[in-house]
Amino acid sequence: MITSVLFDMGGTLEDIFVDERSEREAIEKLQAMLTQFGLDPAVPYEELKRRVDDGWVRYGQYRDGCDEELKPVRIWRDYVLEDFRFPAEKLEPHCEQIAHMWEITHYHRAIRPRVKDMLEGLKGLGMKLGIVSNTAALYQVFDTLEEYGIRNYFQDVTLSSVTGIRKPDPAIFQVALRQIQSAPEQCVYVGDTVSRDIIGSKRAGFAVAIQIGSQLTKEKDKGVRREFEPDYLVDDIYQVYPIVRGLLGGE
């Protein structure tokens, strides 16, 4: 019997995308923050962006090769800002603040329509609710849920930045299952990618996997070997509620 529904965050509960404006704003804020912290990069915007982009590529190659997530201090010190050789004792205290800024600035984020109605419906069915999210910041997901007014719906929020494990590694799903106190065969997972969400949750033994497309789905799923397929495809997050109701034997 289904008792729990767990969600991805970016691309699932919220719309998320990157464009030229958000990229520029993130670099400009980064430059201002570094200067404020006494870490002036002393390079023009274009050079700072090039080095930061290169650093993210290096970090992406690392994490995608092992499904591990480093803490923000290591991401920014050892990868994103590595070329600047900033003194560790001056940079490290600010890395989480930088990481938080990056997550809410580099990406446009907005809660999807009808999320609250969907969560209310699931709550009414007696479902336990949780989140399993890949993120490079420690606190941003919690703060964003608060800003959206939906934090209190979730009994658990499991983050790659806290566990050190990234989807699709089934271990991060298993951490969430233990925290929400549910067996995988009792659970539904909802995400926007096959590569991370569908494959990861199915490897972990979840009963049902639901996919909702996002503006980043094609990019994230490019070239992935489709080991599993979603049980349901939806284009409106509210559709999760009638699907789960139907799994429980309702109309």
Image: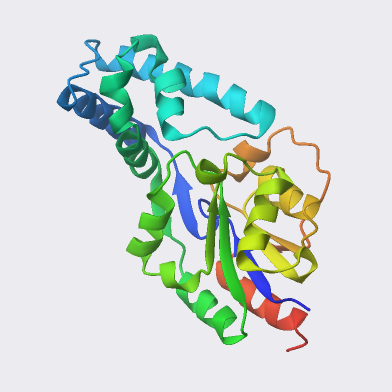
Relative to 241, is 142 on the left or the right? left
Give how far across and how far down residue 204 sits, in percent: 77, 53
Identify the residue shown where x is 61% and y is 84%.
126
For the image, the number of numbered tags is: 0
Query: 18 or 199: nearer the eye?
Result: 199
- Residue extending farthest to the front is 89
Q: Nearer the viewer, residue 199 or 161?
A: 161
Counting from the top left corner in percent of width and height, residue 148 is at: 37, 64
The quadrant of the image that shows the N terminus is: bottom right
Side (left or right) of 128 relative to 251 = left
Whether residue 234 appears in this view of the structure is: no
Q: Quadrant of residue 227?
A: top right
Quarter of the rendering containing residue 35: top left
**Quarter holding residue 166:** top right
Residue 210 visible in the snapshot: yes
| Scheme by which the image is coloured | rainbow
In the picture shown, does residue 87 fall above or below 190?
above
Q: Residue at x 20, y 16 (%)?
A: 40
Residue at left offset 53%, top offset 24%: 59
- Residue 222 x %, y %: 68, 35
> In x, y percent, where is residue 54?
47, 16
